[in-house]
Image (cartoon, rainbow, N blue to C red):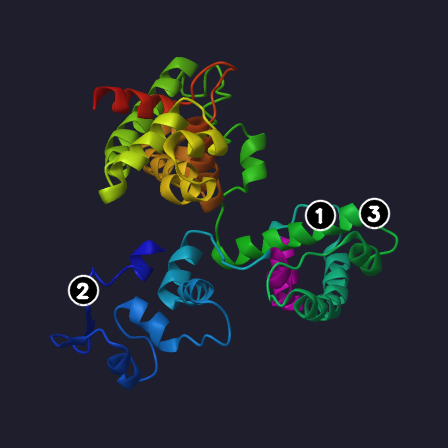
């Protein structure tokens, strides 16, 4: 996704032809024709209407609507649409064909099609009410009351589960993907590895100690690459930044940390952002780990990759045992003591 969105190479110019460029200015953007222009960030700005939504949300919508990106994701078994919207925008014919091929349920295909037919008008009305209530076009999910309205004779939890199963079948039908869902992968023992709950061994004979060693080494390299820049980026406030990180490393919370460094709690969150930095470190480490066979399953889907990053981030910020020092705090302590 980043390769589509960040294609401007840091230049302050717009490509107007195979070998011609113009200054990246609002006037030049307005003068360019409708349609995709390059770089893609220029297309986002050219088409942005502040009356519709904020710029970050608009950028996300434009990126997700990019045909090349959608084709790439579809090739890898990913559709950027919720289960509930996917059901709404699927015809009865598509539902029948998808369920005949991929649905795992005791319900007949005809019963499934009837449920889907009842779902369509309910979705339209519920989404309309959701937009009026929240001002958002996304985020709606069926309630138990909705499920009872769809099928009064079935347990509402079972109805919602069946709808999700239909959506999964449609995804498989549209993408041709045989990639398992996260739940199926977990049942098969291929859940992303959580550093705090490693198995004793995996099917390839890699034991807990070796897995932990791979994780620790990847995180160490990522911290060595990322954190020195963070701790030296304070400019005129470098002394304050070092004071804050030193206090954070020994476990001080915001209020005593602010008192120690002569600042306010609000300044601390803006100056440090440890969770954001932990996420960046975890992402770098996850990219390295996925090259190893023991972590190959974590590259099977976007969700699996995100769960690996989340597990690594939590490992960085939380000690494994009570009384231990979290890895990121320990790294900051060691770095500052050597400086």
Disc 3/disc 2 C-alpha distance (Å): 58 Å
- Across and down, in percent, residue 26 comes to 28, 78
Q: Is residue 71 among the parts visible in the rendering?
A: yes
- Residue placed most toward the observer, 54 or 196: 54
Q: Earlier in the sequence, mark 1 or mark 3?
A: 3
Query: Which corner quadrant of the image does residue 114 belong to?
Result: bottom right
> Magenta residues?
83-100
Residue holding disc 3 = 155
- Left or right: 213 in relation to 131: left
Q: Quadrant of residue 32?
A: bottom left
Q: Does the stretch in magenta take in 19?
A: no
Q: CA distance from mark 1 to mark 3?
A: 10 Å
Q: Is residue 46 left or right of residue 95?
A: left
Locate residue 100 relative to residue 115 in the image: left or right.
left
Badge 3: residue crowd in 10 Å (few <14, some 14–19, many ≥20): few
Q: Position of residue 241 (x, y in %)?
A: 31, 36
Kindly tell me whether residue 289 is visible in this rendering.
no
Label ID, residue 11: 2
Element type where label 3 sits in the image? loop
Please tell me which of labels 3 and 2 falls first in the chain.
2
Q: Position of residue 163 (x, y in %)?
A: 69, 54
Q: Nearer the viewer, mark 2 or mark 1?
A: 2
Mark 1 in CB contact with mark 3 (< 8 angstroms): no
Badge 3 vs badge 2, beta-carbon distance below 8 Å: no
Whichever of callouts 2 and 1 sits on the residue coming sooner in the sequence is: 2
Front-most of 310 and 118?
Answer: 310
Please give the label number shown on residue 309. Answer: none
Location of mark 1 (residue): 161
Relative placement, left or right, of 265 versus 287 is: right
List x then y, in percent, for residue 14. 21, 73
Q: Nearer the viewer, mark 3 or mark 2?
A: 2
Q: Is residue 311 above or below residue 209?
A: below
């Amino acid at each position: 996704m980043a390769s589509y969105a960040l294609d401007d190479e840091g230049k302050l110019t717009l490509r107007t032809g195979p070998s011609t460029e113009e200054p990246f200015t609002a006037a030049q953007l307005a003068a360019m024709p409708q349609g995709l222009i390059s770089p893609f960030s220029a297309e986002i700005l050219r088409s942005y209407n502040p009356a519709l939504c904020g710029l970050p949300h608009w950028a996300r919508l434009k990126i997700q609507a990019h045909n090349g990106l959608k084709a790439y994701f579809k090739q890898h078994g990913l559709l950027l649409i919720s289960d509930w919207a996917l059901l709404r925008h699927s015809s009865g014919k598509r539902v029948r064909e998808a369920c005949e091929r991929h649905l795992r349920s005791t319900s007949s295909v005809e019963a499934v099609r009837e449920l889907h037919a009842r779902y369509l008008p309910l979705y339209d009305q519920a989404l309309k009410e959701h937009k009026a209530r929240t001002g958002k076009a996304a985020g709606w999910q069926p309630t138990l009351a909705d499920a009872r309205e769809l099928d009064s004779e079935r347990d509402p939890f079972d109805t919602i589960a069946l709808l999700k199963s239909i959506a999964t079948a449609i995804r498989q039908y549209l993408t041709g993907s045989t990639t398992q869902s996260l739940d199926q992968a977990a049942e098969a023992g291929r859940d992303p590895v959580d550093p705090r709950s490693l198995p004793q061994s995996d099917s390839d004979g890699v034991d807990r100690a070796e897995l932990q060693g791979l994780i620790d080494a990847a995180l160490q390299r990522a911290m060595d690459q990322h954190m020195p820049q963070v701790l030296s980026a304070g400019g005129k406030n470098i002394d304050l930044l070092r004071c804050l990180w030193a206090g954070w490393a020994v476990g001080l919370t915001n209020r005593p940390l602010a008192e120690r460094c002569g600042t306010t709690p609000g300044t601390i969150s803006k100056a440090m952002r440890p969770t954001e930095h932990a996420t960046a470190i975890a992402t770098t480490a996850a990219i390295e780990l996925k090259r190893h066979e023991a972590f190959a399953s974590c590259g099977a889907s976007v969700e699996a990759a995100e769960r690996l990053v989340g597990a690594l981030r939590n490992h960085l910020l939380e000690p494994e045992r009570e009384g231990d020092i979290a890895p990121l705090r320990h790294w900051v302590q060691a770095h500052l003591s050597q400086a």
